[in-house]
Image: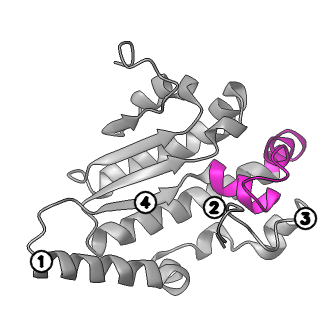
């Protein structure tokens, strides 16, 4: 949920690494049907927006969107974007195997979710590592970057002509590595010197 003024809230965050297997679907369960069941309302919104754009002769791109796996893990274990902000890194350090398992599941989910957005009318896609500022460079390279590599590889394989963007907020150290992946655009934030960004 996202009530006004308090940021994103996850009512029942994961309480222990054991809950990765007891509460989270297995990677084999993540498919097109799963996305339609859990996120069909988003896909319906994409279809409705495209229909309205056609009716109004709007010739602008509709951008599909997903948070990136590390950001999703951060919310799933911390429960909030403003409280328990150290727990994401704590999970990575104390439960590396369970963290990798969860990130692999989330990577597949992001791929299927973003694919469904394209199939329902999105013109281009952005992967948003909103909590990039909550992970250090070593852990980003170890945990977050492999997820983004797989997302970019698979989405460009499925949709080679759909522009793919990535934004790692507050983690400009990642931009060089991200630029070597299959993203078409690396979005930069205010901390990056525009004169040296290229």
Q: Disc 3 vs disc 4: which is toward the camera?
A: 4
Q: Name the residue under label 2.
A: 105
Q: Disc 1 on helix, strand or loop?
A: loop
Mark with earlier residue (1, 4) = 1
Residue shown at 11% from the left, 63% from the top: 59
Mark with earlier residue (3, 1) = 3
Q: Name the residue under label 3.
A: 15
Secondary structure character of the magenta stretch overall: helix
* Left or right of 153 on screen, residue 53: left
Q: Mark 4 points at which residue?
A: 65
Magenta span contains residue 75: yes
Percent of width and height locating residue 137: 67, 26
Q: How far apart are marks 2 and 4 (CA)?
A: 18 Å
10 Å neighbourhood of mark 1: few (<14), some, or many (≥20)? few
Residue shown at 36% from the left, 69% from the top: 117
Q: Disc 3 vs disc 1: which is toward the camera?
A: 1
Residue shown at 46% from the left, 84% from the top: 41
* Left or right of 174 on screen, residue 96: right
* Left or right of 162 on screen, residue 2: right
Percent of width and height locating residue 132: 62, 39
Whether the residues at callouts 3 and 2 have beta carbons within 8 Å, the answer is no
Percent of width and height locating residue 182: 36, 38
Mark with earlier residue (2, 4) = 4
> In the image, which residues are magenta?
70-97
Mark with earlier residue (3, 4) = 3
Q: Disc 3 vs disc 2: which is toward the camera?
A: 3
Q: Mark 1 points at which residue?
A: 56
Q: Disc 3 on helix, strand or loop?
A: loop
Q: Distance between the residues labelled 3 and 4?
A: 28 Å
Q: Disc 2 on helix, strand or loop?
A: helix
Q: How far apart are marks 3 and 1 (CA)?
A: 48 Å
């Amino acid at each position: 949920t996202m009530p006004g003024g308090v940021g994103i809230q996850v009512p029942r965050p994961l309480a222990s690494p054991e809950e990765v297997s007891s509460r989270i679907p297995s990677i084999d369960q993540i498919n097109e049907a799963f996305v339609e069941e859990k996120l069909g309302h988003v896909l319906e919104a994409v279809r409705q927006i495209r229909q309205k754009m056609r009716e109004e002769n709007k010739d602008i791109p509709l951008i599909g969107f997903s948070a990136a796996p590390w950001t999703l893990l951060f919310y799933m274990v911390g429960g909030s974007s403003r409280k328990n902000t150290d727990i994401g890194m704590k999970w990575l350090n104390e439960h590396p195997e369970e963290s990798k398992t969860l990130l692999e599941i989330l990577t597949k989910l992001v791929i299927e979710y973003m694919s469904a957005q394209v199939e329902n009318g999105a013109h281009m896609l952005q992967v948003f590592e909103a909590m990039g500022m909550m992970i250090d460079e070593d852990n980003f390279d170890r945990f977050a970057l492999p997820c983004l590599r797989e997302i970019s590889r698979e989405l460009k394989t499925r949709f080679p002509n759909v522009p793919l963007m990535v934004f790692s907020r507050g983690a400009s150290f990642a931009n060089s590595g991200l630029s070597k992946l299959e993203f078409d655009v690396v979005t930069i934030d205010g901390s990056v010197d525009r004169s040296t960004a290229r």
